[in-house]
Image (cartoon, rainbow, N blue to C red):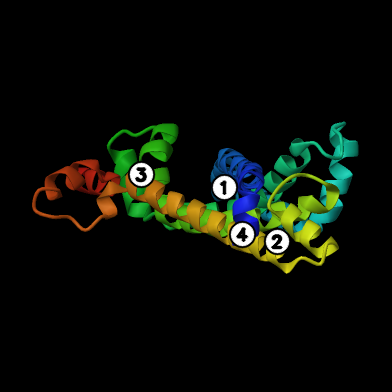
Amino acid sequence: MSWFLANFSMVMSLAGYHLFQAVLPLVLSVVIAVPLAQLARLNKAVAGVILSAGSLLYTVPSLALFVILPSLLGTKILDFTNIIVALTIYAVALLVRSTLDALNSVDDTIRQAAVAMGYKPVHRFLTVDLPLSMPVLFAGLRVISVSNISLVTVGALLGIPSLGFLFTDGLQRNFPTEIVVGIIGTLLLALLVDVALVVAQRLLTPWLRTPGRKDRKTIRMTAPAAAVGEGA
């Protein structure tokens, strides 16, 4: 405990770097994976190519990818860009499949009702398909967030600052306390991001909350499933 308090600012700085390297790829993966998953849902041939490519990319060892990317991107070995790109690739590889499952979980009768009400494809996707797929999509995001936070520590082997530095430095100095602090810090970050995702899901899917008497009218008005279903 005394070592942690004496090095508090350093640990917090490393935690900030760690969080940045884990969360930004998660955001980028959503932007990339959602359109790819929708494309895969609409075309089975494309789906096979996308899912196969994702599975193949995820089998590439993380350390090897961190080493190869600088030569491909023209960046320095200690550049954060290498970690961001690598983790985005891994996150997209996982998220495309889970997003496809999320989109397939939407009842076709709801889609047909939306079409009957005059919804255009893009409008229907943004206001019906995507909102109703949020619970399954966020389940995938929570798994990927833990994976990202874990993989960020590997970058410490190349000298990129993160909580993984506490692992390598503690091992070199034969100082278990530093390693334990790194492990606890990584676990707390994973818990923090998971809680943030749970809160985000609740905010984006208010119709899934258990309604009280005062909330029932509001939830009925905000639930896309109810709105389309009643229109059908």
- Disc nearest the viewer among 2 and 4: 4
Residue type highlighted by circle 3: Leu
For the residues marked 2 and 1, what is the alpha-carbon distance in whole angstroms?
42 Å
- What mark, if any, has residue 37 been given in the picture? 1
Q: Earlier in the sequence, mark 3 or mark 4?
A: 4
| Left or right: 220 as drawn, with respect to 123 | left
Q: Position of residue 208 (x, y in %)?
A: 28, 54
74 and 100: which is toward the camera:
74
Per the image, the residue denoted by label 4 is: 2
Per the image, the residue denoted by label 2 is: 178
Residue type highlighted by circle 4: Ser
Residue found 86% across the figure and 53% down from its top: 64
Q: Residue furthest left?
A: 213
- Disc nearest the viewer among 1 and 3: 3
* Crowd tier of the residue under label 4, counting other residues whose Cα lies within 10 Å: few below 14, some 14–19, many 20 or above: few
Label 2, secondary structure: give it: helix
